[in-house]
Amino acid sequence: MCGRFTLITPAQVLAEQFELVEIPALSPRYNVAPSQPVAAVRQPPGNKGRELAMLRWGLVPFWAKDPAMGSRMINARSETVAEKPAFRAAFRQRRCLVLADGFYEWQRLERGKQPFYIRLRDKRSFAFAGLWEHWQGADGTVIDSCTVLTTEPNELVRPLHNRMPVILAPEDYGRWLDPGPQKAGMLQPLLRPYPSEDMQAYPVDTWVNNPRNDDLQCIEPLA
């Protein structure tokens, strides 16, 4: 599962790393939570260049009668995403990169749960494999939303949780973003656990447990 993450990398760096046409206006986020806007990169049809969009975290299927359904759709299992009614249409042709530079998991202990912050060893930003969807209600309300794909954990994450978000390799961004319909067999090989040797994890304070706390204290290592 992926239920909280960070995006504190400067906008200029993100624009260069993800080949954005424009530099986005983003504020540092230390505790991104479900239902909040997240920064996602999409590839519009017609080779117009990649765009950054703010999408609500929690995918609302285009056929949903109630957008509250999105609260249960923050993650999608990569093994079944091509068949699940809520995700299969988006998986075929509405894929995106959800930008992050770290995420949190909680390890169960006898005294409760210990939060851990997980990031790449070089501290660079990266992209979760995401899907996005466009929903419009009968009253004209429009919601663009997204979900983060998950996979089996690598050796680093396994002691903390039985799932981890899919972190795409940079060389796979283009194939994942291709707006044309794609067969599942072409995309499934991309949805693998990220190499554990390229990642690090450390315990942080339970300050992060409250999504209203969104500051540097969330990622500071425990003394």
Image (cartoon, helix red, strand yellow):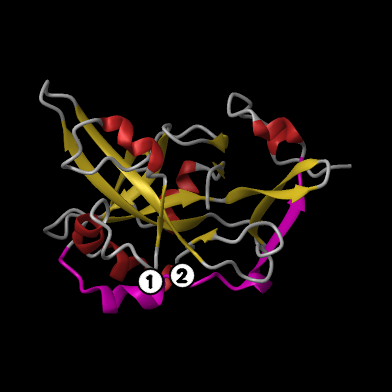
Distance from the alpha carbon under mark 1 to that under mark 2: 5 Å
Quarter the C terminus occupies: top right
Residue labelled with disc 1: 172
Which residue was labeled with disc 2?
169
Residue 10 visible in rendering: yes
> Measured from the top left, where is residue 161 in percent x and y?
63, 57
Report if residue 56 is visible in the image. no
Residue sitting at 26 percent across and 51 percent down?
Answer: 86
Horizontal relation, residue 212 to residue 188: left or right: right
Mark number for residue 200? none
Q: In this view, which residue lies farthest toward the front?
A: 110
The stretch drawn in magenta includes residue 63: no
Q: Are marks 1 and 2 in contact (CB under 8 Å)?
A: yes
Q: Residue at x 61, y 29 (%)?
A: 214
Question: Which structural element holds mark 2?
Answer: loop
Q: What's the residue at 74%, 35% (across, down)?
A: 206
Q: Looking at the picture, tell me which residue is in the foreground, 190 or 127.
A: 190
What kind of residue is marked 2? Ala
x, y percent for residue 110: 82, 46
User: Quick check: is 189 in the magenta stretch?
Assistant: yes
Q: From the viewer's perspective, is 49 left or right of 75?
A: left
Above/below status of 123 relative to 156: above
How many other residues sit within 10 Å of disc 2, few (<14), some (14-19) or many (≥20)? Answer: some
**Residues shaded magenta:** 180-204
Q: Is residue 110 above or below residue 82?
A: above
> In the image, what residue occupies the spot 15% across and 28% down?
137
Name the amino acid, label 1.
Asp
Q: List x then y, in percent, for residue 121.
A: 68, 63
Crowding around mark 1 (Cα neighbors within 10 Å: few <14, some 14 to 19, many 20+) is few
Corner quadrant of residue 146: top left
Which residue is situated farthest in the top direction here? 139
